[in-house]
Image (cartoon, rainbow, N blue to C red):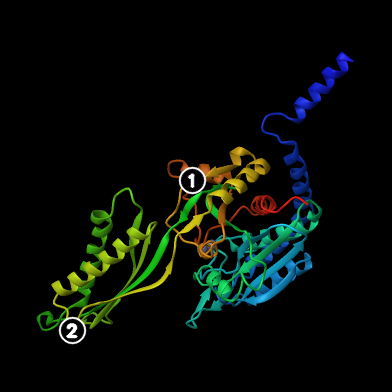
Amino acid sequence: MRAGAAVAMTVVTLLTAPGRDPAAEVGARDLDRIIAAQYADLDSLYRDLHAHPELSLHEQETAKRIASELKAAGFAVTSGVGGNGVVAVLRNGEGPTVMWRSDLDALPVKEETGLPYASDVRANDDSGRLVPVMHACGHDVHMTTLVGLARGLKDLRSQWSGTAILIGQPAEERVLGAAAMIKDGLFSRFPRPVAVLGMHVKADLPVGVVGYRAGPAFANVDNVDVRVYGRGGHGSTPHLSVDPIVIGARIVLSLQTIVAREIDPIEPAVITVGSIHGGTKHNIIPDTVDLQLTVRSYTEETRNKLIEGIRRNVLAEAQGGGAPKPPDVTIGESTPATVNDPGLTARTVAALKKALGDDRVVEVPPIMGSEDFTYYGREGIPAFMFNLGTIPNETIEQSRRPGGKPLPSLHSSQYAPAREGSIREGVRAALTAVLANLSAP
Ligand SMILES: [Zn+2]
Ligand SMILES: [Zn+2]
């Protein structure tokens, strides 16, 4: 009896070794089984999506493919929501409604990964220009994960209760798709979720590691257009004209002093002049010069200071150069900062740590990039987007050695996620995150 008890004690100790939760163990076996059963099929879906990218607002074939995959997984699918948006609903009894978002679009980038399934697609952009197209932002990983998630939710439907909504969102890269889907009734024609979740690949995080940030995670972004007016003339007689190119050059430099001298050094802020255009020929002073700026910040106060500073400096330089009329400063497309809901983040991160291990779920710093995922949270629904690492550890380590090859960033022609690990761990993370927010049956 005593000996028997001692044996039983040992077994119990092994099963409940530190960091292992019996409930999570059952979940892990289910996840392993689902991923193993689906992997080959998801892998071929990924290669196919990767080889056939479509530009923002042109995602027709991609949307069709995703809609048919989600339908086959047992979801009720509505297409054409806010353009090429896809909404898939699985009702599974009483309980909360949870939404998961993937994006659909690709970028005008010429792929240089050398992969056997690399894209050689070329397509006309909105201006009619023929451009190369590539999934350089990993949205093909997101879509493959979306399909794996749909099949997993269907498979595990005896283990959860509520409504799952999976969406394929168009035009993320143009910051148009989320707003278009909301405007087309995403939250009124379909059950209104209590949580919106999403995941984005990360190009400097080890494959299978999840990165997250509670609170502000992505920046405010404003696109600003400036037109400077001068008075054109012959290049040999500058005294008879007002040269807007010289004024434009001064503007580029004086804008840099706003961040350096007017913003609290502890406060994140960026002003980048990404484009400057003026003139046609060596010896002609043009009438105008156009500048395009991206302006990034985290708080409304800093954003207002940056924009006010741009208006003031642009006007001052134009006046200083004797411009015949004040410049135009136009604040165009703007994306508000993405703020992850703290409660939703904490609950989801706890589940991810159980499923992936504490050391594979890490906090990441906020970035000055932007995401139109922010619009879902702005509808008053708690939202949380986390990152999925996609790069082999050895590649990251090698890049950190002296003289090592720098890692290609997202949007790079050479960005190539480690396919198998990204798909397997992407599905694991997505299923874990969604299930953590649905009810037990
Ligand atoms: Zn992108
Ligand atoms: Zn992206």
Position of residue 45 relative to residue 11, above or below, is below
Left or right, 23 with reference to 358 = right
Q: Residue 4 occupies which quadrant of the picture? A: top right
Left or right, 126 with reference to 67 = left
| Residue at the left extreme of this rendering | 239
Q: Position of residue 53 (x, y in %)?
A: 60, 70
Near-viewer residue (195 or 318):
195
Q: Disc 1 vs disc 2: which is toward the camera?
A: 2
Label 1 C-beta lies within 8 Å of the nearest ligand 1 atom: no
Position of residue 214 relative to residue 66, above or below, is above
The type of residue carrying mark 1 is Ser
Secondary structure type for disc 2: loop
Q: Which residue is mark 1?
A: 399
Q: Position of residue 77 (x, y in %)?
A: 72, 72
Residue, x 69% and y 58% (percent of image)? 96
Near-viewer residue (361 or 120):
361
Q: Residues within 10 Å of mark 2 (few under 14, many from 20)?
A: some
Q: Which residue is mark 2?
A: 231
Q: Is residue 389 visible?
A: no
